[in-house]
Amino acid sequence: MDLGINGKTAIVCGASKGLGRACAEALALEGVSVTICARTEEAISAAAREIEGLSGQTVTAVACDIATEAGRAAVLATCPDPDILVNNAGGPPPGDFRDWDRDDWVKALDANMLAAIFMIKSTLDGMVERGFGRIVNITSGAVKAPIGILGLSNGARAGLTGFVAGIARDKRTAGSNVTINNLLPGAFATDRLIGMFDEAARARRVAAIPAQRFGIPAEFGQLCAYLCSAQAGYITGQNVLIDGGAYPGTL
Ligand code: NAD
Protein backbone atom coordinates (compact mmCIF):
# COMPACT_ATOMS: atom_id res chain seq x y z
CA MET A 1 0.00 0.00 0.00
CA ASP A 2 1.33 3.42 -0.99
CA LEU A 3 1.04 5.61 2.11
CA GLY A 4 0.80 8.79 0.05
CA ILE A 5 3.59 10.65 1.85
CA ASN A 6 6.32 10.45 -0.78
CA GLY A 7 8.10 13.83 -0.89
CA LYS A 8 6.94 14.93 2.57
CA THR A 9 9.40 16.08 5.26
CA ALA A 10 9.68 14.69 8.78
CA ILE A 11 11.48 15.27 12.06
CA VAL A 12 12.05 12.13 14.11
CA CYS A 13 13.46 12.78 17.59
CA GLY A 14 15.57 10.26 19.52
CA ALA A 15 16.35 8.28 16.39
CA SER A 16 19.91 6.93 16.47
CA LYS A 17 18.57 3.54 17.58
CA GLY A 18 15.53 1.72 18.91
CA LEU A 19 11.94 2.74 18.22
CA GLY A 20 12.69 6.27 16.97
CA ARG A 21 15.19 4.90 14.48
CA ALA A 22 12.65 2.32 13.28
CA CYS A 23 10.12 5.13 12.69
CA ALA A 24 12.70 7.14 10.72
CA GLU A 25 13.53 4.09 8.59
CA ALA A 26 9.89 3.31 7.83
CA LEU A 27 9.19 6.93 6.84
CA ALA A 28 12.32 7.13 4.66
CA LEU A 29 11.27 3.92 2.91
CA GLU A 30 8.00 5.70 2.05
CA GLY A 31 9.95 8.47 0.32
CA VAL A 32 9.91 10.95 3.20
CA SER A 33 12.91 13.27 3.61
CA VAL A 34 13.79 12.77 7.27
CA THR A 35 15.70 14.87 9.82
CA ILE A 36 16.76 12.75 12.79
CA CYS A 37 18.30 13.70 16.09
CA ALA A 38 20.04 12.15 19.08
CA ARG A 39 22.61 13.46 21.52
CA THR A 40 25.80 11.91 20.09
CA GLU A 41 27.19 13.20 16.78
CA GLU A 42 28.83 9.90 15.86
CA ALA A 43 25.75 7.77 16.55
CA ILE A 44 23.24 10.03 14.79
CA SER A 45 25.47 10.55 11.71
CA ALA A 46 26.02 6.79 11.41
CA ALA A 47 22.26 6.18 11.69
CA ALA A 48 21.58 8.79 8.98
CA ARG A 49 24.05 7.20 6.56
CA GLU A 50 22.58 3.75 7.22
CA ILE A 51 18.97 4.91 6.65
CA GLU A 52 20.09 6.69 3.48
CA GLY A 53 21.70 3.47 2.25
CA LEU A 54 18.54 1.53 2.98
CA SER A 55 16.03 3.99 1.52
CA GLY A 56 17.84 6.11 -1.04
CA GLN A 57 16.31 9.18 0.67
CA THR A 58 18.15 12.18 2.05
CA VAL A 59 18.49 11.86 5.82
CA THR A 60 19.80 14.81 7.83
CA ALA A 61 21.43 14.20 11.20
CA VAL A 62 21.34 16.72 14.05
CA ALA A 63 23.31 16.02 17.24
CA CYS A 64 21.34 17.59 20.08
CA ASP A 65 19.45 17.00 23.29
CA ILE A 66 15.76 17.33 22.44
CA ALA A 67 14.99 17.88 26.14
CA THR A 68 16.62 21.33 25.90
CA GLU A 69 15.49 24.53 24.20
CA ALA A 70 18.81 24.78 22.34
CA GLY A 71 18.45 21.20 21.12
CA ARG A 72 14.94 21.80 19.79
CA ALA A 73 16.09 25.04 18.12
CA ALA A 74 18.89 23.14 16.34
CA VAL A 75 16.49 20.55 14.89
CA LEU A 76 13.95 23.20 13.88
CA ALA A 77 16.66 25.31 12.21
CA THR A 78 17.43 22.30 10.01
CA CYS A 79 13.79 21.41 9.27
CA PRO A 80 11.58 24.40 10.19
CA ASP A 81 8.35 23.25 8.48
CA PRO A 82 8.00 19.48 8.83
CA ASP A 83 4.90 17.73 7.50
CA ILE A 84 5.46 14.94 10.02
CA LEU A 85 6.78 15.08 13.59
CA VAL A 86 7.65 12.02 15.66
CA ASN A 87 8.40 12.95 19.28
CA ASN A 88 10.64 10.63 21.25
CA ALA A 89 13.34 10.68 23.93
CA GLY A 90 14.87 8.13 26.27
CA GLY A 91 12.68 7.02 29.15
CA PRO A 92 13.43 8.04 32.76
CA PRO A 93 15.04 5.52 35.12
CA PRO A 94 12.94 3.18 37.30
CA GLY A 95 13.01 3.52 41.08
CA ASP A 96 11.17 4.29 44.30
CA PHE A 97 9.35 7.65 44.29
CA ARG A 98 10.65 8.28 47.82
CA ASP A 99 14.13 8.64 46.34
CA TRP A 100 13.24 11.20 43.64
CA ASP A 101 13.77 14.86 44.24
CA ARG A 102 12.58 17.85 42.26
CA ASP A 103 15.49 17.62 39.79
CA ASP A 104 14.60 14.01 38.96
CA TRP A 105 11.03 15.06 38.21
CA VAL A 106 12.08 18.08 36.15
CA LYS A 107 14.39 15.88 34.03
CA ALA A 108 11.57 13.41 33.37
CA LEU A 109 9.09 16.18 32.54
CA ASP A 110 11.62 17.90 30.24
CA ALA A 111 12.34 14.74 28.25
CA ASN A 112 9.02 12.92 28.21
CA MET A 113 6.44 15.69 28.36
CA LEU A 114 7.70 19.21 27.67
CA ALA A 115 10.02 18.35 24.74
CA ALA A 116 7.05 16.96 22.79
CA ILE A 117 4.79 19.87 23.81
CA PHE A 118 7.32 22.50 22.66
CA MET A 119 8.02 20.64 19.38
CA ILE A 120 4.26 20.57 18.74
CA LYS A 121 4.01 24.27 19.61
CA SER A 122 6.70 25.09 17.03
CA THR A 123 5.28 23.03 14.17
CA LEU A 124 1.51 22.71 14.52
CA ASP A 125 0.39 26.07 13.09
CA GLY A 126 2.48 25.58 9.94
CA MET A 127 0.88 22.18 9.43
CA VAL A 128 -2.57 23.72 9.87
CA GLU A 129 -1.78 26.45 7.32
CA ARG A 130 -0.49 23.91 4.79
CA GLY A 131 -3.49 21.60 5.32
CA PHE A 132 -1.50 18.50 6.19
CA GLY A 133 0.26 17.33 9.33
CA ARG A 134 0.91 14.14 11.24
CA ILE A 135 2.27 14.14 14.78
CA VAL A 136 3.06 10.91 16.60
CA ASN A 137 4.33 10.86 20.19
CA ILE A 138 6.10 7.72 21.32
CA THR A 139 4.87 7.18 24.88
CA SER A 140 4.43 3.78 26.59
CA GLY A 141 2.01 0.96 27.26
CA ALA A 142 2.50 2.05 30.88
CA VAL A 143 0.16 4.99 30.13
CA LYS A 144 -2.71 2.48 30.10
CA ALA A 145 -1.32 0.02 32.65
CA PRO A 146 1.14 1.88 34.91
CA ILE A 147 4.13 0.03 36.35
CA GLY A 148 4.90 1.14 39.93
CA ILE A 149 8.67 1.48 39.60
CA LEU A 150 8.25 3.62 36.47
CA GLY A 151 6.64 6.49 38.37
CA LEU A 152 8.65 9.20 36.61
CA SER A 153 7.56 7.84 33.25
CA ASN A 154 3.94 7.29 34.36
CA GLY A 155 3.66 10.87 35.59
CA ALA A 156 5.38 12.65 32.69
CA ARG A 157 3.66 10.62 29.99
CA ALA A 158 0.24 11.01 31.59
CA GLY A 159 0.78 14.79 31.39
CA LEU A 160 1.62 14.60 27.68
CA THR A 161 -1.31 12.27 27.03
CA GLY A 162 -3.77 14.65 28.67
CA PHE A 163 -2.37 17.63 26.75
CA VAL A 164 -2.60 15.80 23.42
CA ALA A 165 -6.16 14.64 24.10
CA GLY A 166 -7.21 18.30 24.28
CA ILE A 167 -5.31 19.87 21.39
CA ALA A 168 -5.86 17.01 18.91
CA ARG A 169 -9.59 17.75 19.06
CA ASP A 170 -9.26 21.43 18.31
CA LYS A 171 -11.43 21.93 15.22
CA ARG A 172 -8.87 24.14 13.46
CA THR A 173 -6.30 21.36 13.87
CA ALA A 174 -8.40 18.27 13.13
CA GLY A 175 -10.33 20.17 10.46
CA SER A 176 -7.09 21.01 8.64
CA ASN A 177 -6.03 17.38 8.12
CA VAL A 178 -3.58 17.59 11.03
CA THR A 179 -3.64 14.59 13.36
CA ILE A 180 -1.93 14.04 16.71
CA ASN A 181 -1.72 10.53 18.14
CA ASN A 182 0.30 8.69 20.75
CA LEU A 183 1.89 5.34 19.94
CA LEU A 184 2.24 3.13 23.03
CA PRO A 185 4.91 0.43 22.88
CA GLY A 186 4.67 -2.69 25.00
CA ALA A 187 7.93 -4.64 25.24
CA PHE A 188 10.16 -4.12 22.20
CA ALA A 189 13.58 -5.63 21.68
CA THR A 190 15.63 -2.43 21.79
CA ASP A 191 18.85 -1.70 23.69
CA ARG A 192 16.82 -0.04 26.44
CA LEU A 193 14.66 -3.08 27.06
CA ILE A 194 17.37 -5.70 26.63
CA GLY A 195 19.63 -3.75 29.02
CA MET A 196 16.96 -3.94 31.75
CA PHE A 197 16.86 -7.74 32.11
CA ASP A 198 19.18 -10.67 32.63
CA GLU A 199 18.38 -13.85 30.67
CA ALA A 200 16.05 -15.39 33.27
CA ALA A 201 14.11 -12.16 33.75
CA ARG A 202 13.85 -11.76 29.98
CA ALA A 203 12.33 -15.25 29.64
CA ARG A 204 9.79 -14.47 32.37
CA ARG A 205 8.87 -11.20 30.67
CA VAL A 206 8.37 -12.91 27.29
CA ALA A 207 6.28 -15.68 28.90
CA ALA A 208 3.85 -13.05 30.21
CA ILE A 209 3.17 -11.63 26.72
CA PRO A 210 0.37 -13.40 24.80
CA ALA A 211 2.37 -13.11 21.55
CA GLN A 212 5.21 -14.97 23.36
CA ARG A 213 7.89 -12.66 22.05
CA PHE A 214 9.17 -9.11 22.22
CA GLY A 215 8.06 -6.69 19.52
CA ILE A 216 10.37 -6.03 16.61
CA PRO A 217 11.24 -2.32 16.20
CA ALA A 218 10.37 -2.45 12.46
CA GLU A 219 6.79 -3.42 13.41
CA PHE A 220 6.58 -0.29 15.51
CA GLY A 221 8.10 1.87 12.75
CA GLN A 222 5.64 0.59 10.17
CA LEU A 223 2.66 1.37 12.40
CA CYS A 224 4.08 4.85 12.96
CA ALA A 225 4.42 5.32 9.18
CA TYR A 226 0.77 4.29 8.77
CA LEU A 227 -0.35 6.85 11.38
CA CYS A 228 1.60 9.41 9.33
CA SER A 229 0.01 8.31 6.05
CA ALA A 230 -2.47 10.17 3.87
CA GLN A 231 -4.97 7.38 4.63
CA ALA A 232 -4.81 7.94 8.41
CA GLY A 233 -6.32 11.44 8.30
CA TYR A 234 -9.42 10.34 10.25
CA ILE A 235 -7.44 8.95 13.22
CA THR A 236 -6.65 11.62 15.79
CA GLY A 237 -6.38 12.02 19.55
CA GLN A 238 -5.84 8.28 19.96
CA ASN A 239 -3.55 6.19 22.13
CA VAL A 240 -2.56 3.29 19.93
CA LEU A 241 -1.19 0.30 21.80
CA ILE A 242 1.22 -2.15 20.13
CA ASP A 243 2.08 -4.78 22.73
CA GLY A 244 1.49 -8.36 21.53
CA GLY A 245 -1.71 -8.54 23.60
CA ALA A 246 0.00 -7.74 26.92
CA TYR A 247 -2.60 -5.17 28.07
CA PRO A 248 -5.32 -7.28 29.69
CA GLY A 249 -8.32 -4.94 29.34
CA THR A 250 -11.22 -5.14 26.88
CA LEU A 251 -10.81 -1.49 25.83
P1 NAD B 1 16.53 3.40 23.16
O1 NAD B 1 17.29 3.76 24.37
O2 NAD B 1 16.83 2.13 22.45
O3 NAD B 1 16.63 4.61 22.09
C1 NAD B 1 16.37 5.93 22.47
C2 NAD B 1 16.87 6.87 21.37
O4 NAD B 1 16.60 8.21 21.77
C3 NAD B 1 18.36 6.78 21.14
O5 NAD B 1 18.63 7.10 19.80
C4 NAD B 1 18.90 7.89 22.04
O6 NAD B 1 20.17 8.36 21.63
C5 NAD B 1 17.84 8.94 21.82
N1 NAD B 1 17.68 9.90 22.93
C6 NAD B 1 17.46 9.62 24.25
N2 NAD B 1 17.32 10.76 24.94
C7 NAD B 1 17.45 11.79 24.04
C8 NAD B 1 17.40 13.19 24.16
N3 NAD B 1 17.22 13.79 25.34
N4 NAD B 1 17.58 13.94 23.03
C9 NAD B 1 17.78 13.35 21.84
N5 NAD B 1 17.84 12.02 21.67
C10 NAD B 1 17.67 11.26 22.76
O7 NAD B 1 15.00 3.45 23.62
P2 NAD B 1 13.71 2.76 22.95
O8 NAD B 1 13.54 1.39 23.50
O9 NAD B 1 13.74 2.97 21.48
O10 NAD B 1 12.54 3.61 23.62
C11 NAD B 1 12.06 4.83 23.06
C12 NAD B 1 11.03 5.40 24.01
O11 NAD B 1 9.95 4.45 24.18
C13 NAD B 1 11.58 5.64 25.43
O12 NAD B 1 11.00 6.80 25.97
C14 NAD B 1 11.13 4.42 26.20
O13 NAD B 1 11.01 4.65 27.58
C15 NAD B 1 9.79 4.14 25.56
N6 NAD B 1 9.38 2.74 25.71
C16 NAD B 1 10.11 1.74 25.20
C17 NAD B 1 9.70 0.43 25.36
C18 NAD B 1 10.49 -0.74 24.80
O14 NAD B 1 10.08 -1.88 25.02
N7 NAD B 1 11.56 -0.54 24.10
C19 NAD B 1 8.52 0.16 26.07
C20 NAD B 1 7.78 1.21 26.59
C21 NAD B 1 8.22 2.52 26.40
Image (spheres, grey):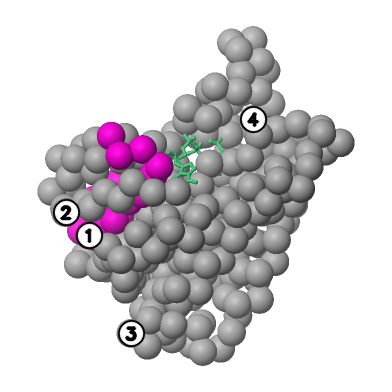
Where residue 219 sits: x, y (%)? 42, 42
Q: Secondary structure at mark 4?
A: loop
**Label 1 vs label 2: CA separation?**
6 Å
Crowding at dot 3, Cα within 10 Å, few <14 / some 14-19 / many 20+, comes out as few
Pointer 4: what residue? 209
**Label 4 vs label 1: CA separation?**
35 Å
**Label 2 vs label 4: CA separation?**
37 Å
Q: Secondary structure at mark 2?
A: loop
112 shown above or below 161: above
Tell me which corner region of the image, top left, top right, bottom left or bottom right, holds residue 71. Answer: bottom left
What type is the residue that disc 3 sits on? Arg
Contact flag, marks 1 and 2 (Cβ < 8 Å) = yes
Which span is picked out in magenta?
22-42
Going from the N terminus, do you reach mark 1 or mark 2 first? 1
Where residue 105 sits: x, y (%)? 72, 48
What type is the residue that disc 2 sits on? Thr
Going from the N terminus, do you reach mark 4 or mark 3 first? 3
Crowding at dot 1, Cα within 10 Å, few <14 / some 14-19 / many 20+, comes out as many
Going from the N terminus, do you reach mark 2 or mark 4 first? 2
Quarter of the figure with the N terminus: bottom left
Pointer 3: what residue? 130
Going from the N terminus, do you reach mark 2 or mark 3 first? 2
Q: Which label number is shown at residue 58?
A: 2
Q: Which label number is shown at residue 33?
A: 1
Taking 179 as reference, is 75 left or right? left
Disc 4 versus disc 3: nearer the observer: 3
Queried whether the magenta region covers residue 57, the answer comes back as no
Quarter of the figure with the C terminus: bottom right
What type is the residue that disc 1 sits on? Ser
